[in-house]
C-alpha cells in the first residue's frame, strides 16, 4: 500500500461545500458529543469490502474528497484505481484525529460503494427474474438485485 497525497479534486469537489447535508445523523451527533466532551484521540480507520474486486474504481475520488475536507490533518494510505482487490483486506487506511474523520465516513463510503457496484443492466435483471419465475412454476418467488 502506498501513501496517497493527491491534491487534485475530481467529482468529490461537488460535495465538499455541503457534505454535511449527506452525512448520516449519528456521525454528526458523534462529532458533536466528542467536541462537547473535548475528546479527540488519534484513530485509524480501515476500509474494506467483503468481496474480491477485479478492478477498483472510486478510490481516487474518495481520497480527493477526504483530502479536500480534512487537508493534511489525515494520513491516507490506499490502493489505487485499476488495481485488483482481495476481499476482506484493507483497501484504504485513514489515520488522524477522530473529529477530523468521523463526519466524512458517509460520503467516502458512498463514493466507494457506488463505484464497486457498477451499472446494473436492467435487461439482464429482467431475464434472470423471468427465468426464476419459470423455474418456480406455481410456487411463490421473490427476486432482488444485490
Image: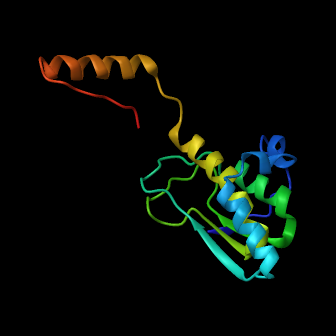
**33 left or right of 126?**
right
Q: Position of residue 37 (x, y in %)?
A: 78, 81
Quarter where residue 135 is shown: top left
Q: Position of residue 61 (x, y in %)?
A: 72, 48
The quadrant of the rendering that contains the N terminus is bottom right
Q: In the rendered image of this protein, does residue 37 appear above or below residue 8?
A: below
Answer left or right for 140 relative to 27: left
Q: Is residue 48 visible?
A: yes
Q: Nearer the viewer, residue 8 or 70?
A: 70
Residue 72: percent from the left, percent from the top? Answer: 85, 69
Q: Residue at x 63, y 47 (%)?
A: 110
Question: Left or right of 80: which side holds 5?
Answer: right
Q: Is residue 81 left or right of residue 41?
A: left
- Position in image of residue 90 (x %, y %): 54, 66
- Residue 36 drawn above or below residue 59: below
- The answer to which of 17 and 39 lies nearer the viewer is 39
Does the image show residue 3? no
Question: Residue 79's quadrant in the figure?
Answer: bottom right
Amino acid at each position: 500500500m502506498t501513501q496517497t497525497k493527491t491534491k487534485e479534486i475530481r467529482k468529490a469537489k461537488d460535495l465538499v461545500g455541503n457534505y454535511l447535508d449527506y452525512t448520516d445523523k449519528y456521525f454528526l451527533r458523534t462529532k458533536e458529543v466528542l467536541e462537547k466532551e473535548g475528546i479527540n484521540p488519534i484513530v485509524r480507520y480501515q476500509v474494506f469490502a467483503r468481496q474480491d474486486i477485479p478492478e477498483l474504481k472510486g478510490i481516487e475520488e474518495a481520497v480527493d474528497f477526504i483530502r479536500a475536507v480534512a487537508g493534511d490533518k489525515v494520513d491516507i494510505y490506499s490502493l489505487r484505481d485499476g488495481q485488483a482487490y482481495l476481499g476482506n483486506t484493507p483497501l484504504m487506511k485513514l489515520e488522524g484525529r477522530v473529529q477530523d474523520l468521523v463526519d466524512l465516513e458517509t460520503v467516502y463510503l458512498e463514493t466507494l460503494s457506488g463505484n464497486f457496484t457498477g451499472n446494473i443492466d436492467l435487461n439482464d435483471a429482467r431475464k434472470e427474474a423471468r427465468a426464476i419465475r419459470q423455474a418456480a412454476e406455481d410456487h411463490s418467488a421473490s427476486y432482488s438485485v444485490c
